[in-house]
Amino acid sequence: MISQLKERLGTQLTFQQYASVASYISSFSYSTTVSIASASLLLEINIELMEDVLNTLTDIGTLQRDHVIRCPECLFLIETIKAVEITNDFFKKIYCHCCENDIEADASDVDVFYSLTKNN
Ligand SMILES: [Zn+2]
């Protein structure tokens, strides 16, 4: 997995950063979900580069990328949606079980999460 990542990203990451990415991913369980921001903070890799790393790991099949609607009131993760649904005028009325209320979500309430691919 890391050798494929090195093939794609080359010297953008240091030896140390590849090592920390490898140990980070190997610590995942099937219920682990990470955002670009949290991985970036934890591994001390800048956010643009972290996005490249996570997207490359998705391309090579290690991770899968999911889009979720987060409640704008309480930040509860309400629903996983397909990337194609997210347009600039994306809008959805949806029930939040945490607030016990109907809320209105738009594109700014959509977060991207990565997790281990379920079929490997
Ligand atoms: Zn809520």
Image: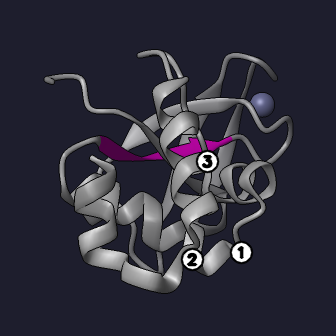
Specify the amino acid type for callout 1: Asn
Q: Which residues are magenta?
A: 63-70
Specify the amino acid type for callout 2: Leu
- Mark 3 and mark 1 lie on one chain; the one further toward the N terminus is 3
- Depth check, mark 3 against mark 2: the one in front is 3
Q: Which mark is residue 81?
A: none
Quadrant of the rendered structure where residue 109 is? bottom right
At x 66% / y 43%, what residue is drawn? 70
Q: Which mark is residue 49?
A: 2
Q: Which mark is residue 20?
A: 3
Label 2: how many Cα within 10 Å (few below 14, some 14–19, many 20+): some
List x then y, in percent, for residue 91.
Answer: 51, 62
List x then y, in percent, for residue 79.
Answer: 48, 33
Label 3: how many Cα within 10 Å (few below 14, some 14–19, many 20+): some
Does the segment drawn in magenta span residue 64? yes
Question: Is label 2 in contact with label 1 (beta carbons under 8 Å)?
Answer: yes
At x 78% / y 61%, what residue is drawn? 44
Magenta stretch: dominant SS?
strand
Query: According to the image, label 1 marks what residue?
Result: 46
For mark 1, give the secondary structure: loop
For mark 2, give the secondary structure: helix
List x then y, in percent, for residue 73.
Answer: 85, 42
List x then y, in percent, for residue 94.
Answer: 56, 37
Tell me the distance, in whole angstroms, between the alpha carbons under discs 2 and 1. 6 Å
